[in-house]
Image: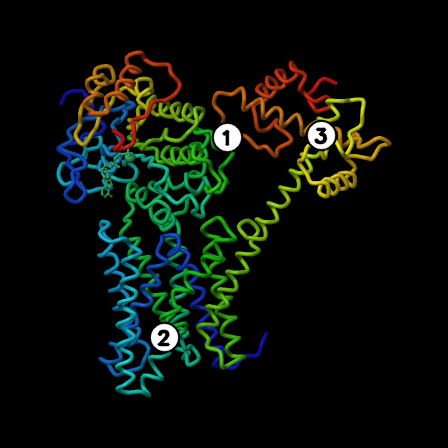
């Protein structure tokens, strides 16, 4: 074998369908280790489904996934996950620290309660996202951006080699966005692979090293410079030309515009 | 201690143990979104009870409860099958299964009644609304044993169930057998419901799982306290209902237990310190009154700022049209009692204490205003318009900057902290 490390995530021939309707079609991609990877595509493109298939939460019609060159394992060697915020009930009777501690359960195993070591790890994760002062806050009393950061802290507490995040930047203010991005960079510096579903085309180039353009099938994947091009974006976003041209224009300019362009919702074209 | 007869003591033991188990199990059922399902489960036990009676001809509890378990579980499996992959919405599936099974049960029990009226009267009717009065010591001890086992299991698996109830996807990724944990929880719910049948009956069995748990949730915000409180409520309701029905034998025990739980829930809804209706209304009223006070002081302060030489007249305040004349008078009187204003010879004057507070209020509101105007990105979580002290909410350098720009335009209230003496 050559010295090249195996890809962090290898997806082969992956097809996922809900009933008869395909949602992901024959996806074949390798995600290199130690990079920040953006997953971009219009609404309904299957971005969340791709993450969930990699995590083993949906059963593919065909194909397989490998993490670090091996079939997916769980717990200690599994994946860190930041789900979309809306996926849980925020009126659940737990506080912020409880949620972050859930990231340590995998290492803890059956029946054992989190102890001081776990609490320290959770507090450290909370510090990284700037939430240490809210550790004892009831989760129902958090703002959207704070909820997002709690999920991020829980993922950090998992201490996984690979992280998958579903729109961690959605609905957060600029300060939180900067804080989250800082955490992502720290993870990369520590050699972790971070895959992020992202909606804001304006910031893709700034944030990521590598990009997956997805719309049912994989339109393109590779380093930002070669892959995040106007043609590929056109192919990904299809007929939404005018809006897309604005985006492409922004991409070309390396825009500094602060009003983020977002793809239109499904069916807007 | 209230002296109780032996029979009542046995029933007390049984129902209290039932309440203990139902509180914890019910809390988990509630948090996993299984409250409605446990009701369907309870109703689905009726045909099983009738069939068991028809098959065995016996009225002994073990046989009938085994029948109950069978069709109850069948109902749950049916709901799961119907609602899998979103074929049918779960609540619709639950409604359909509940009604069909219960209907079948009623029809069966009608048929039994016609064939052997006395047997049915004694055995089956009790299962509809519960009839714990005839509980045997062995039955009470069985319930107590199951209750202890339930509590042990919940204590053992609290962490795992917490995770699965809060975020099942995350649990699955972390390698927890979500299905197994769910199945175990469903078994626990089923056992509790079936045990509750002789005491509170098919129709009300789910209530003693759901109501104490819902009431407990109103008081506490963490899982373990909720489990403990819900179990305590369960015991309290059971004991109350049982004692009442021992005192007034015409009243049936099962419904009284549920009614007692309902009263606990109602009381919780009214008076729980954070989520209770009274607490919320009081807090809101207090906030509003405090806001009015601040507004009055701020208004007097700005009036005086505009014309420092002349005291503020009540008429000038009335012209602001913020308060009707009666309210204004009441607010002014309140402020005077608190030592913030006094009636001078020509109108209203702020006392020293009043002036200081008013300056703080005006300063805070102007800084917030300035903050909203000047910042491109606003962290809403930081803003608290009721706060008179801003120092801990905004970074100090930002406050200093905002103050400077206010001072430049002569808008920084004199006499407030941080301003030039
Ligand atoms: N549980 C489900 N049952 C049926 N169809 C589903 C289900 N979940 C998703 N889909 C469909 O699969 C497609 C892809 O969904 P997915 O959530 O992966 O898209 P996405 O790229 O994450 O979209 P968004 O940008 O809106 O988050 C959509 O067309 C959606 O309607
Ligand atoms: Mg999505």
Chain bearing mark 1: B
Ligand 2 is found in which quarter of the picture?
top left
Front residue of B395/B108: it is: B108
For label 1, the SS is helix
Q: Disc 3 designates what residue?
A: B358
Chain bearing mark 3: B
Where residue A52 is drawn, which disc sits there? Answer: none
Q: Disc 1 designates what residue?
A: B380
Residue B326 found in image quarter: top right
Residue B366 found in image quarter: top right
Residue sitting at x 23%, y 40%? A56
Total marks in image: 3
Tag 2 and tag 3 share a subunit: yes
Q: Please state the horizontal and vertical placement of residue A39, each as a whole percent of the image.
A: 26, 27
Residue sitting at x 81%, y 22%? B309
Would you place residue B226 above or below residue B324 in this image?
A: below
Spatial CA span between label 2 and label 1? 54 Å
Spatial CA span between label 2 and label 3? 67 Å
Earlier along the polypeptide chain: callout 1 or callout 3?
A: 3
Earlier along the polypeptide chain: callout 2 or callout 1?
A: 2
For label 3, the SS is helix
Earlier along the polypeptide chain: callout 2 or callout 3?
A: 2
Spatial CA span between label 1 and label 3? 25 Å
């Amino acid at each position: 074998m050559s010295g090249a490390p195996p890809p962090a995530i290898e997806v082969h021939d992956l097809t996922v369908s809900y009933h008869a309707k395909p949602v992901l079609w024959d996806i074949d991609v390798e995600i290199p280790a130690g990079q920040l990877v953006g997953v971009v595509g219009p609404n309904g493109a299957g971005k969340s489904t791709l993450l969930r298939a990699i995590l083993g939460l949906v059963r593919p019609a065909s194909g397989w996934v490998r993490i670090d060159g091996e079939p997916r394992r769980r717990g200690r060697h599994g994946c860190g996950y930041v789900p979309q915020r809306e996926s849980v009930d925020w009126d659940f009777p737990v506080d912020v620290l409880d949620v972050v501690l859930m990231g340590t359960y995998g290492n803890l195993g059956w029946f054992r309660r989190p102890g001081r070591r776990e609490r320290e790890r959770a507090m450290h994760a909370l510090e990284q996202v700037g939430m240490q002062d809210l550790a004892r806050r009831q989760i129902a009393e958090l703002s959207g951006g704070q909820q997002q950061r709690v999920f991020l802290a829980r993922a950090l507490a998992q201490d996984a080699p690979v992280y998958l995040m579903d729109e961690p930047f959605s609905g957060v203010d600029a300060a939180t966005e900067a804080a989250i991005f800082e955490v992502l960079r720290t993870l990369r510096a520590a050699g972790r692979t971070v895959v992020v579903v992202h909606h804001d085309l304006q910031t893709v180039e700034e944030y990521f090293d590598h990009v997956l353009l997805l719309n049912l099938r994989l339109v393109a994947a590779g380093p930002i410079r070669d892959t995040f091009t106007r043609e590929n974006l056109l192919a990904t976003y299809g007929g939404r030309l005018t809006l897309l041209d604005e985006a492409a224009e922004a991409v070309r300019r390396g825009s500094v515009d602060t009003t983020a362009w977002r793809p239109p919702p499904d069916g807007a074209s | 201690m209230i002296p109780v007869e032996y029979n009542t003591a046995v029933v007390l033991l049984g129902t209290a143990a039932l309440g203990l188990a139902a509180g914890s199990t019910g809390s988990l059922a509630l948090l996993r979104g299984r409250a409605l399902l446990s009701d369907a489960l309870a109703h689905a036990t009726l045909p099983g009870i009738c069939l068991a009676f028809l098959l065995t001809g016996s009225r002994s509890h073990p046989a009938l409860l085994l029948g109950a378990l069978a069709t109850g579980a069948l109902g749950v499996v049916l709901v799961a099958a119907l609602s899998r992959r979103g074929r049918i919405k779960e609540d619709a599936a639950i409604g359909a299964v509940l009604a069909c099974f219960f209907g079948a049960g009623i029809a069966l029990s009608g048929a039994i009644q016609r064939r052997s009226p006395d047997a049915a009267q004694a055995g089956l009717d009790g299962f509809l609304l519960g009839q714990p009065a005839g509980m045997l010591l062995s039955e009470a001890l069985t319930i107590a044993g199951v209750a202890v086992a339930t509590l042990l299991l919940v204590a053992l698996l609290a962490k795992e169930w917490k995770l699965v109830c809060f975020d099942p996807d995350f649990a699955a990724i972390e390698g927890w057998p979500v299905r197994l944990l769910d199945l175990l929880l469903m078994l626990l719910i089923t056992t509790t419901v079936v045990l509750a049948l002789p005491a509170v009956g098919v129709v009300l069995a789910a209530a003693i799982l759901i109501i104490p748990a819902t009431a407990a949730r109103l008081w506490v915000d963490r899982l373990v306290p909720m489990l403990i409180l819900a179990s305590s409520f369960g015991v309290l309701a059971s004991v109350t209902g049982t004692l009442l029905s021992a005192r007034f034998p015409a009243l049936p025990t099962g419904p009284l237990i549920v009614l007692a739980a309902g009263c606990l829930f109602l009381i919780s809804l009214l008076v729980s310190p954070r989520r209770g209706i009274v607490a919320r209304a009081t807090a809101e009223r207090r906030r509003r009154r405090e806001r009015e006070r601040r507004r009055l002081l701020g208004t007097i302060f700005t009036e005086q700022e505009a014309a420092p030489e002349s005291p503020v007249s009540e008429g000038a305040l009335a012209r602001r049209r913020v308060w009707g004349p009666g309210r204004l008078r009441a607010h002014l009187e309140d402020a005077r009692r608190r030592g913030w204003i006094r009636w001078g010879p020509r109108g209203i004057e702020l006392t020293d204490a009043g002036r200081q507070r008013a300056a703080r209020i005006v300063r805070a509101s102007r800084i917030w205003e300035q903050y909203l105007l000047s910042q491109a990105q606003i962290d809403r979580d930081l803003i608290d318009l009721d706060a008179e002290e801003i120092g801990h909410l905004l970074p100090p350098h930002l406050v200093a900057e905002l103050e400077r720009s206010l001072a430049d335009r002569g808008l920084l209230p004199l006499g407030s902290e941080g301003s030039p003496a």
